[in-house]
Amino acid sequence: MGELIEHFEDPSISEKIIGSTRSFEGRLLKVDSVDIELPNGHKTRHEVIRHPGAVCVVALDTQGRVLVVRQYRTALERVTIEVPAGKIDPGEDPEDAVRRELAEETGYVAGDIRRLASIVSAVGYSDEIIHIYMATDLEPGPAHPDDDEFVISEWVGIESLIDSVLDGRIEDSKTVIAALICDALRHRM
């Protein structure tokens, strides 16, 4: 088994940004056309989606169930099952964003929040980083989703969640990764 790679920087494969132009600016996303000089001296252009960052949370109750939300996703034109999640507001700490999103979408308030990992959702064309957290010691309360957000929350057993990931019923990448991390942690404890 190989050892963990500690240093990722390697000048022999590093690219140099020589210019950038904003191609699109929307409510959430921005797109930059980035001019690059490759290690061999050739030049090319990449399109990069700029995203403010996001959080997601695996909310676990004392019965070993996970809180998920059903939400219609326009890009897929269907309802998906996901762990609660949302974007980080400018200047907001990711842990504060987790607490806010959990309360907004589900009404639950977490007594304990633990960071699990951070992932880059589409490393080839986006700078979005999603911070994955686990929430426990949950207290119910009223949900207050955003005006343009319609979600239904429900509890599912962790085994059912993992089965749904493994058989392809859950496709959302952050939910797949969060569920598998929780399953791995459960087997290590």
Image (cartoon, helix red, strand yellow):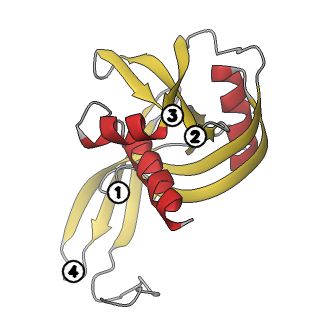
| Label 2 Cα crowd, 10 Å radius (few <14 / some 14-19 / many 20+) | few
Q: Is 63 left or right of 50, judged from the image as shown?
A: right
Within 10 Å of the Cα at label 3, are there few (<14), some (14-19), or many (20+) other Cα atoms?
Answer: many
Q: Earlier in the sequence, mark 3 or mark 4?
A: 4
Secondary structure beneath label 1: loop
Residue 123: mark in rendering: 1
Q: Foreground residue, 109 or 186?
A: 186
Label 1 crowd (10 A; few <14 / some 14-19 / many >=20): few
Quarter of the rendering containing residue 62: top right
Q: Earlier in the sequence, mark 1 or mark 4?
A: 4
Q: Which residue is mark 4?
A: 41
Q: Residue at x 23, y 38 (%)?
A: 167
Q: Earlier in the sequence, mark 4 or mark 2?
A: 4
In this rendering, position of residue 152 left or right of residue 74: right
The amino acid type found where label 2 is placed reads: Gly
Identify the mark at residue 105; answer none if there is no mark.
none
Q: Quadrant of the C terminus?
A: bottom right
Label disc, if present, on residue 83 of the rendered structure = 3
Residue 87, position as x, y percentages in the image: 58, 36
Kindly identify which residue carries mark 2: 64
Mark 4, other Cα within 10 Å: few <14 / some 14–19 / many ≥20: few
Secondary structure, mark 2, is loop
